[in-house]
Image: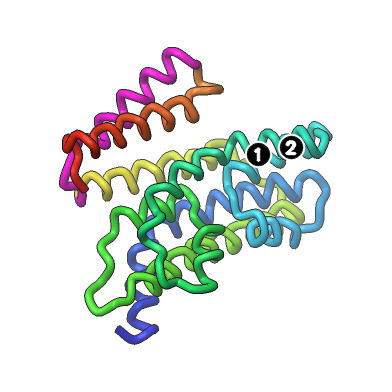
Amino acid sequence: MPERAQLAAAFRATLPVLFGYVPLGAAFGFLFSGLGYPWWLAPLTGLVVYAGSAQFLGVGLLAAQAGLLETALAVFLLNARHLFYGFSMLGRYPGTGWTKWYLVFGLTDETYALLTSTPVPASTRPQGFYLAVTALNQCYWVIGCAVGGLLGTNLRVDTTGLDFALTALFTVLLIDQLRSATAMYPFVVAAVSGIAALWLLGPDNMLLGALAVSLSALLIGRRTGVWAS
């Protein structure tokens, strides 16, 4: 498939992310510029850091004048879930050459959801499709950060409720995964693990607990044949 057609296929696949990332990135840029930083630092952060939840956390840490060690530890714990994502992507990136490093860097929650649920179009190189999806998603995020940075510098806008765009985006991606799934076992495991971790660990610590339990259950299920991919 020609590169233009491949890019068009990736664009269609990433439309849900576009409608989530631009307003969410704008919310970050708006809040970030509100701390008194130049507007262009917001898109630069989206380009270099590219971690939505960590960037929002960073706004709070900067506002609280947190130290470097405290900031590094908080960001590591928040993004530790990506370790689990990486395990399931090991077999998808062979033969990608130097682009593998960017694919690893750009593996956000939403990109992971798309790459694991969207069939690669016929006659398209999987590696090229993965790269296009990853790059487009980051472009959406950086554009949103830039728009928010400019708005935050020049306007005073009420962003109450705008952060719900991330929850809505996750819901849309979950629905897409449910439609393409051939087994419900992983979704049941995820739901039960999340509820149990929330009940036992509380909202502040439930994410890592739920991921650890889910990963263990899925590995056991694969070995016993309960879940076959």
Question: Residue at horizontal 54%, vertical 49%?
Answer: 24
Identify the disc placed on residue 34. Answer: none
Q: Which residues are magenta?
A: 180-201
Question: Of the residues shown, which amino acid type is indicated by label 1?
Answer: Val
Position in image of residue 223 (x %, y %):
23, 37
Q: Rounded to the nearest whole Å, what is the CA distance between mark 1 and mark 2?
A: 6 Å
Q: Quadrant of residue 148?
A: bottom right
Position in image of residue 227 (x %, y %):
20, 39
Going by the picture, which residue comes out furthest to the front? Answer: 223
Please give left or right for residue 175 compared with residue 182 in the image.
Answer: right
Q: What main secondary structure does the magenta stretch of the protein show?
A: helix
80 shown above or below 99: above
Position in image of residue 193 (x %, y %):
35, 25
Question: Of the residues shown, which amino acid type is indicated by label 2?
Answer: Thr
Question: Residue at horizontal 33%, vertical 76%?
Answer: 125
Identify the disc placed on residue 71. Answer: 2
SS for tag 2?
Answer: helix
Q: Which residue is mark 1?
A: 75
Badge 1: how crowded within 10 Å, few (<14), some, or many (20+)?
some
